[in-house]
Image (tube, coloured by chain):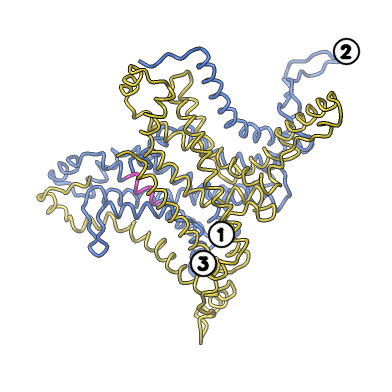
Amino acid sequence: MRKKRTFLQSVLLYATVLFWCFIVLFPFYWLLTTSIKTQISVSRGPKYLPSFEVPFITIIDEDGNEVPYTTPGDFTPTGQHWQDLFTRDRDEVVRHFRNSLIAASGSTILALIIGSMAGYGLSRFKYYWGRLGWDNENIAFWIISNRFLPPALFVVPFLLIYSRLGLIDTHSGLIIAYTMFNLPFAVWIMRDFFNGLPIELEESAMIDGASRVTAFLRIVLPLSAPGLVAVAIFSFVFSWNEYLYALMLTNFEAITMPVLIAGQNNTRGIQWWFISALTLTAVAPVVVIGLLLERYITRGLVAGAIKG
Amino acid sequence: MQEKATPSVARKDQYAVMKRVFLYPAITLLLALSIFPLLWSLGISFTDFQRGDQAIQANEGEEVSGGLGFNLTLQNYTRMLTDERLHATIRNTFFYVFAGVIIQYFFGFGLALLLNQHFIGRNLVRVIFLMPMMVTPVAAAYTGRMMFDSTISPLAQLQRTLTSMVQSIGAALPGDFLDNAVVSIPWLTDSFVAPLTMVLIDSWQWIPFMTLLLLAGMQTIPDEIYEAARVDGASSWRILTRITFPILLPISATVILIRGLEIFKIIDVIMVTTGGGPGNATESLTMYIFRTALTFGNYGYASAISFALLVAVIIFATLFLAGMRRVTPR
C-alpha cells in the first residue's frame, strides 16, 4: 500500500507536473505559431493566439454589415511561409531533407548489422586478447568508450582523410562518420539483449543441424527485436540531429537539415517565421518517432546506461 | 555472462572461425575510424601543419619532394600555456559541465520523484517529457534564441511588464526610489548571463534524460523497503535521503558521467545562439578547436588542443569514477 497523499500534496504534484509540461511544450507551440505569423506580427512584440475566420458563420457588426466570425486571438495567421517552404524553396528543402534521411538511414542500417553481430559475438563467444590481457568485458568497455571520445579529436584527421579519399560532401562520407558514433552504443545495447536470451535456444537449433549463422538470423535476432528497435531509434535520431560533422564534411551537395537551419542565420538574416517552419520540418520526424516508440527508447536507455 | 558453447556444438559450428566473423567487422571499423585517426592526429599535433600544406599535397597527388611541407615542433603545446582564449574556453567548458550536470541532475531527480507517484495521465506526461530529447540541438538552440530574444519574446514582454510595475510602485513611493528601475536580463548579450542561458537551453533538452533513467531506477526499488521504513515511523524526507537517494547512487553516477561527457562536447547550441559571443564569453573548447581547424586552418594547433581536451575528459571521468566508488555503498 502506498501512503495516501493529502489534498495539498496532490495539488502540488499536479501543479508541478503541469508546469513542467508547459515548459516542455511552450517552445513547440511558439515555433508553430511563429511559423504562421506575418513579419509584422513577429516584430511587433510577442503575439500568442492566432484568430481564424470561421467559415459559414457570420455576425452583424455595428454598421449593420455581415462580417465573417473570427475566433478571438491577437494576430491573423498566414500560410505564406509554409507555402514558400514547399514552393519557392522546395528543391533546397527536399534535397537537404533527403540528405538527412540517407545519412541517418545508411548509418542506422550499418550500425544495426555490424553492431548486432559484434554484440552477439561478445555475448556468446569467449575472447582473450593475450597481448593486451583483455577479455570480453575489456573489449566491450573499449568499444563503448569510443562513444564518449570528444568529436573535436577527429576534426583534423577526418578532414585530411576525407579530402584524400574524395569523401567530402558525399553521402557515404557522412554515413561512415556516423556509423563510427552509432556503432559503440549498438554493440553495447545488443550485447545486453543477447545476454538476456538463453543460450539453449541456439544450441538446440544447432544440434538439429542449423548453422551458427542460421541460428543467429532465424532465432536470436527475431527474439531481440526490441533491442534492434532501440538501436535503430538511437542511431537514426543521433545521425539526424548531428551538426558538427555535417558542417565539417559537407559544403553543398550533401548538406543535412541541421546545417541548413543553422545557415539561415547568415544567408537571409533572422527570418524567424521562415526558420520556425523549417525547424518544425526538421524536428517533426524525430519527435514523431519519439512519441510513437517511447517505450523502446526508455528500455534501450535503461539497457544502455543502467545495466551497463 | 559469457557462456561457452558445449564442445559438441563448438566442433560443428567452427567456433574459432565464427567468433572472429561476428566480432571483427566492428573491431576493424573502430580501428580504422577511431584509433588510426587518433594516432594520426597525435602526430599532427607535433607539427606546424597548416591547411595550405595539405593543398599542395592534394594537388600533386604525392607528397612534396624533398620534405613533408611542414616541420616537427613542440610549439603547439607551448602555445597552449599562453593562449588566453584557450584558457577562457576551458573555463567556459568546465562551467557548462558543472552547471549543466548540477541543474539537470537536481531537476531530473525531482521530476523522477514526481513521476514515481501514481497520478492521472502519468503515461502521457512521460511521453511529453521525452519530446525535448528528440529535438535537433540546432533547432532547440534557435527556439531558445527566440525564447530569450530581447524584444520579440514572451520573456521580454514579461520583463517589460515587470518594469512598468516596478516603476509604478516607484512612482507611488516617496523620492526617486525605483522610479527609473528597469527589469531587463540580457540573456544572450551579457558575458555573465549568456553562459547560463546556454546551460538552460541544454537543460531543457536533457533534464528528461536524467528523469527517465532515474525513474527507471526508482521503479526497481521494492515497495517493501518503503513500507518497512514507514512502519518504523520514518518521515518522507528521511526515506528520500536514507533510502531512495543511496539506492540510486550508482545510477546517478552513470547518468551524471554520461551527461558530463556529453556536455564536454557542446557546440551546436552555442554556434546558433551566440556564435561564441559576446567576445568569447560562451565559446566552448570544442568550438575553439573547430574554428582553429576550419576558420584559421591551423591543423597542428587544433590537434594539440583536442588532445588537451581528451586529457581533460579522461581526468574528469577518472576522478569522478574514483570519487563515486568511495561514496557508493557496496
A77 or A25, nearer to the observer = A25
Q: Is residue A257 left or right of residue A118?
A: right
Labelled disc at residue B263: none
Q: Which residue is mark 3?
A: B304
Instruction: Tell which residue pokes out farthest to the left in this image.
Output: B8
Distance between mark 2 and mark 1 Cα atoms: 64 Å
Q: Are marks 2 and 3 in contact (CB under 8 Å)?
A: no
Q: Main secondary structure of the magenta part?
A: helix
Q: What is the letter of the blue chain?
A: A
Q: Quadrant of the N terminus of chain B?
A: top left
Instruction: Tell which residue pokes out farthest to the right in this image.
Output: A63
Mark 1, chain letter? A
Residue B20, given in percent of the width and then of the height, sits at 25, 58
Distance between mark 2 and mark 3 Cα atoms: 78 Å
Color of chain B here?
A: yellow
Q: Is residue B330 left or right of residue A88?
A: left
**Span of residues in magenta:** A183-190
Q: Are marks 2 and 1 in contact (CB under 8 Å)?
A: no
Residue B116, given in percent of the width and then of the height, sits at 43, 25
* Residue A48 inside the magenta-drawn segment: no
Mark 3, chain letter? B
Q: Nearer the viewer, mark 2 or mark 3?
A: 3
- Which residue type does callout 3 highlight? Ala
Residue A13, given in percent of the width and then of the height, sits at 51, 21
Which of the 4 image quarters holds residue B227?
A: top left
Look at the numbered disc 2 and give the secondary structure of its residue.
loop
Tell me which residue sits at (66%, 46%) in the image: B194
Q: Is residue A241 left or right of residue B175?
A: left
Q: Which residue is mark 2?
A: A64
Labelled disc at residue A248: 1
Mark 2, chain letter? A
**Are callouts 2 and 1 both on one chain?**
yes
